[in-house]
Amino acid sequence: MSETGQNPNKSAKTRAEPVLEVRDLVTHFPVRTGVVKAVDGVSFKVYPGQTLCIVGESGSGKSVTARSILQIVDAPGRIVSGQMIFRRADGSTVDLVKLGDRGREIRRIRGNDIAMIFQEPMSSLSPVHTIGDQIIEVLRLHLGLSKTAARARAIELLAEVEIPTPEKAIDRYTFEFSGGMRQRAMIAMSLACDPRLLIADEPTTALDVTTQAEVLDLIKRLQDRHGSAVIFITHDMGVVAEIADDVLVMYRGRVMEQGNVDTIFHHPSDDYTRGLIDSVTRLQRRSDLRAARAPVPADRPPVLEVKNLSMDFEALRAVNDVSFEVRPGETLGIVGESGSGKTTMGRCIVRLLDPTSGEIRYRKPDGEVIDLVTAHGPALKDMRREVRMIFQDPFGSLNPRMTVAQIIGEPLLVNGIARGRELDERVSHLMEQVGLEPAWRERYPHAFSGGQRQRIGVARAVALQPKVIVADEATSALDASLRFQVLDLLLKLQDELGLAYVFISHDIGVIRYLCDRVGVMYRGKLVEVGETEQVVTAPNHAYTKALISAVPWPDPNRRGIHKRHRYVEQV
Amino acid sequence: MTEATTNAGPPRLEVASQSKLIWWAFRKHKLAMAGLIVVAILYVIAAMPGFFAINDPSAQNARTPFHPPEAIHLWSDDGFVGPHFVPSKLKRDPDTLAAIYVPEPEKAVRLVLFGHGYSYRLFGLIETDRHLFASSDPKQPFFPFGTDRLGRCVWSRIMQGAQTSLSIGLVGVALSLIIGVILGGISGYFGGRIDFAIQRVVEFVLALPTIPIWLALAAALPQDWPATLQYMMITIILSLTGWAHLARVVRGRFLSLRTEEFVSAARLDGCSEGRIIFRHMLPSFMSHIIASITLAIPAMILAETSLSFLGLGLQPPTISWGVLLREAQNVRSIATAPWLFAPGGAVVLAVMALNLLGDGLRDAADPYNK
Amino acid sequence: MLRFIFKRVLWMIPALFAVSFLAFVLIQLPPGDFVTNYVATLAASNEIIDQNAADALRERFGLGEPMLLQYGKWIWGILVHGDFGTSFEWQQPVGDLVWERMALTLTLTLSTLVATWAIALPIGIFSAVRKYTIGDYIVTSISFFGLAIPSFLLALVLMYIAVVIFGQDVSGLFSDEYQNAPWTWAKVADLIHHLWIPVIILAVSGTASLIRVMRANLLDELNKPYVTTARAKGLSEFRLLMKYPVRIALNPFISTIAWLLPNLVSGSIVVAVVLNLPTAAPLLLQSLLAQDMYLAGAFVLLICTLTLIGSLVSDILLAIADPRIRLE
């Protein structure tokens, strides 16, 4: 652990007194089996006009650290010891730890001197109060404005965060806004009293990359204008590289390393940090496994050919005239933002949904071609043995009431492939194949971590020795370090079983690592298909350009999302 | 969460099935556990009321009208003599002619555990005269809860009534469940227009007040029907409105399960519709259904009690808690014999225990969403 | 919003027809008809009525006609003339018999509804905010007991206590001197004086379940992220509790009217019989036992209509309170 001041720091000389200095903060959660040390001796300083990123994987204690500052840790958590010296605009200081969590003094600081924005703008705002109501409340509480003055100020604030027609938006409810607009409203609320310190707890995690880029831009501009200090909590190293001045790396409640953003990225001294940086920089290129492979011959007949596929939900055309093909042994990535129809498209291929029109031509190993759109009865059942799916949610996709052996063995059992002793042996073999101990076969899914659960899902998918696997955001729910293990597993199985993948993801990095070719979806349409490297480095379509340029690079020397392309759909 | 931490837990948690997890969660509810024990005891009584009765519940006794409750004593003036009671003799007040019971301590009668009493059929099959408690002197009956106007033993009648009242709850709920599961299942599984139609009917039924409708239906039953037929009709009447709530619960579970990824996964595994429903979906909502059933039984018990109390439910000589409470209908008789409230105590105890049990089950029903 | 209300009111029409048909069918169910009963009653007191006289009675009340035609005549009379038919037993138009009793039923039910809400809301909030404290356990135990005790039993126990300990009679809704007096303010005051006992008795079970509902709703809301947001704004605990989680937990609470009202009406029937209240209940019971079909039908129809209107009101209130429903 190294102190911020001892690091070579380009702005160190010009730095004023810190806005907040946290010393040896300890926050505990008493549970039945003992005490969880969520924050275990964390120290840092935040300076005016600067951004401190606290980065870590889930369970690292970064969010609890942020909440400790405002004394709003969820029950039963409590601050055990430490100091949090906050410096007001007039130079006076106060130790936030001493204020307790209920008194008038801490309440005067919350929302006024220190404001906070949260991850889920939908659930973090009240659904039954208007946006205006929730902003005006802060203005009246801390600044004592009259109703009309507060309303006028709230409209100004909404205009400042670039919400269109703020005088109308003020009387709207949260569910009438899009995700990005909700987060803007949340930011407007936090800026109401011009806080000295803004704490942002994963504010862009729930947003698409293009929306994320806009929100990050907005926070940066507002910070420059108001001179606030920002503590930005995130798990995304790309975002860190894009916005941080200083970085604090947390793991299991402890600070692994802290320092200037350049130092952290280019000269990390801690092994954990190095692993973290490595896990994101590896996504900047294709995987070694894939690089070592011979390219899939272009003349090999496609195993899957999708032609003019469309899917309507009442008035909405979720998938619009999509065509592509996948060859055996190849991975086709499908990338797109939420609402682009990529998941619907994937579900059409495995016939969890019935497409409205189009063809999905599947070539069986014996050369016979069948149309999956019209398949039914025994043909559909046969097809489902050869075209399988891996789901996004490793928790929801495994029946919690069945043992791992039962889950993996289910497709073998219902298809009459194996039973009894033979079934046991095959399940054990499959578990070994995906890197799980066969001895764990009698365990239930709740005994496994996210990464292990996803391996169970993979084992179930390959149990029937399929030819095509549709993987829908298969690694999105996993932390960065685990993501690789699952991606590498998929590549290994591809080699062993000659699989073709349709890999659906919103994450360009993952696509780049894994996929031979990639298709870009936007509002139901496939706007571009091509070799991954070519699409990622030299995209053709304007939307692809906007999408790629909005992705923050995990390198502080390549900050560029403010120079990104913006895409406006031509009607 | 990292790979290392989750494997550190006790291995028994990792191989714990759903029922085990529910049981562990349920066990933590002290009140619910108490409810479970009381419910278990009550249903044992309902299964063999004759064994727990002391006197023949239908036998009238002209020498003992409105006999007050008698206590069990362990000590007499001579020291410990084991469980016994002090019988009393009926006298008339010379002026008012009111009944007075004068205790006769010198005639103390011993109580025998597993003693002989009136004969009855255990489970309706085995002829026996063994009882949990019996008076050692057949001429001196023991009345722990006193007697009613016709000198019948209130305790024994409550035991006998438990069989009717508790089983009517079970049978009524079973009937409701059949209607509710079929309609709710159809509604939730198929969706669309069928769902819309069934939902409108459910809403309509839920918006109706039950008692007037039950009353009107029950009033249509001929009073002279045999007891079993009456019993069946009353349960059918109760379930005619009781199904709607269960149908709604079943539909809700179906709808939320239908969108679960593991159900989609089962479909892709090649499972038939039947296997999806019975192997993959049913275990997930059985616990919820059981909790809802447990909470529906007390409502049925209260309904039967109310109907019988009003004289439109079960008719004497059938014995149920509601029929017994009719004895307590006017102020005069309860002012002279407040022990006639005792069946009400049984109702409260049963309903409370079932509610506590159901509440605990509902809280423990889904051990995975915490 | 107007569209929502319009649609909801439109839905009342088939529901009301269904209810009226149901009421009619229920009344038609018993084997035999009023005249059979009437003849039997007369026979019991040694009066013999001959077949012709019985047929004449049937003719007069239209009992020989097909059921659908009888229903049509009945509902037409109600809709067009407000004529609910004639009570066989009382030999009076049903309308004259039901209205005052229905008005008292409505008064009793609405008073109970208000009392139930007024008691359950604060206690429910208290119980949720002070979860797993002694206070919460006491409230929980009492509400489980309240749920378990049938209201008529509670009425009996209170009557027993009043008679044996205080030597008072608590039945009825009026003192003797106002029993048949015309309506004056003094009579209203007398009504209020008597009303609170049945109101309390009826409110017990509803209150108990509403406390459970409010507690569960609020416990769900207390952990929502918007509560943390409000706290991070610097609101005091009480103010943020009232403005956000309590306000949002109120929405499902409003919809409880829909099932609370039918329950209250049901409960009030049994209690009214025990306490001998001059509401619809005792007369309904009597008319059912006597198969006085038009009278019983009118009561069942009016009582069910009352609860249907209750669920309509609760849906509209919910739409007003919850923008998510209003702006759907």
Image (cartoon, coloured by chain):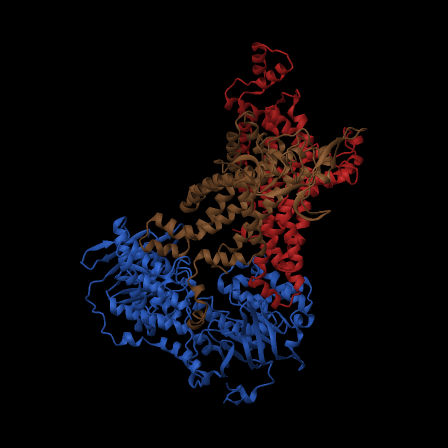
Chain colours: A blue, B brown, C red
Q: Does residue B38 lie above or below B12 as drawn?
A: above
Along the viewing direction, whichever of B227 and C55 lies nearer the viewer: B227
List the single residue furthest toward the front: B78
* Residue B209 can be seen in this image: no
Along the viewing direction, whichever of B273 and B140 lies nearer the viewer: B140
- The x and y percentages for residue C312 are 58, 41
Q: Is residue B251 left or right of residue B30?
A: left
Residue B215's image quarter?
top right
Q: Does residue A46 lie above or below A158 as drawn?
A: below
- The x and y percentages for residue C83 are 62, 25
Q: Does residue A284 lie above or below C164 as drawn?
A: below
* Residue A115 can be seen in this image: yes
Residue A565's image quarter?
bottom left
The quadrant of the picture occupied by the C terminus of chain A is bottom left
Residue C99's image quarter?
top right
Along the viewing direction, whichever of C30 and B85 lies nearer the viewer: B85
